Amino acid sequence: MSKIVVSTSSFGFDHNPVIQQLRARGFTITGNPHQRKLTEDEIIALLGNDTVALLAGIEPLTERVLASASALRVIARCGTGLDSVDLEAARRLNIAVSNTPEAPAQAVAELTLGLMLDCLRQINQIDRSVRQGEWPRSQGKLLAARTVGIVGLGHIGRRVAGLCQAFGAKVIAHDPHLQQAPEGIALVTLPALLEQADLITLHLPYSQAVHHLINAQAIARMQPGTILINAARGGLVDETALCAALESGHIEAAALDSFEQEPYQGPLCGNHQAVLTSHVGSLARETRQRMEIEAAENLWQGMIKAGLINE
């Protein structure tokens, strides 16, 4: 019997009509037994030789993984990024790949705004102090007084821009794929953004071309006291360089929802100027349901095109 694997760390099987239809058609639906991001070896073992379709999370779908899954014909990514998928290997192996770029955008944008406000008003730090019997009277900063630099003005970046503008912030952006930005946003070069913005937020997909886009040299261009937000992909930021900049005070605060190695256990855990969240950008209940349903619908359409099911 043909198998479908759902490898995301959590998934609402009982509330997904497409999954129920696939079960009714006789497919075996297998979830992620570890309930976390899978390693390469773990996803290979889970796929085996009888999986025809994969509803994917952020596990590494390398050429080795794809080649090992001889029956695999469809990958539907539950989320935006496709950097975890070897797209060239998928093409060679005749495996169709899709994603859900629009579904998580609002949730990631709202988390980004929350991380900004936390860094500006020191919410986490003050909370910890109060719990320890202290009563700090720390002065924070206003988002309205910031120049926010957005790197990547796609589905998420545009929403972040709108939220920041609603607070009264000035917004500039860098996106090499755009010729014209939405009203009220100035498109600038990356060096200009690094130099002009005092709050920088990343919203671009990861590739080797942008590995450690924010490195020691990029940080040196930033104004002293800059705040950095990364709710995109971990590989965009050199975490060692960021930690050094936080310790020196050149970067005033940083908030990260994505890391090069997850679960993250690196030196930023010991820095109170860093706000760290566990890759939860898309994990708003309403968004998650929509994203899972969209991914399952993409899976269904991919299976029709692959001849695995009839309409």
Image: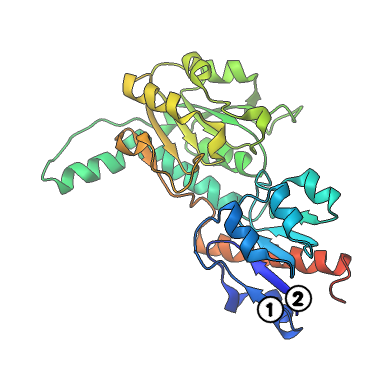
**Three-letter amino acid code at the position of disc 1:** Thr
Q: Residue at x 78, y 62 (%)?
A: 70
Is residue 220 positioned above or below 182 on the image? above
Local SS, label 1: strand
Q: Cβ–Cβ below 8 Å for labels 2 and 1?
A: yes
Rendering coords of residue 28 (x, y %): 68, 78
In the rendered image, which residue does mark 2 sit on?
A: 2
Residues under labels 2 and 1: Cα distance?
A: 6 Å
Q: Residue at x 52, y 68 (%)?
A: 33
Local SS, label 2: loop
In the rendered image, which residue does mark 1 sit on?
A: 28
Q: Where's the N terminus, which quadrant?
A: bottom right
Q: Looking at the image, which is closer to me, 2 or 308?
A: 2
Mark 2 is surrounded, within 10 Å at the Cα level, by few (under 14), some (14 to 19) or many (20 or more) other residues, namely some
Quadrant in which residue 95 is drawn: bottom right
Q: Disc 2 or 1, which lies upstream in sequence?
A: 2
Left or right of 291, for residue 148: left
Is residue 192 positioned above or below 30 on the image? above
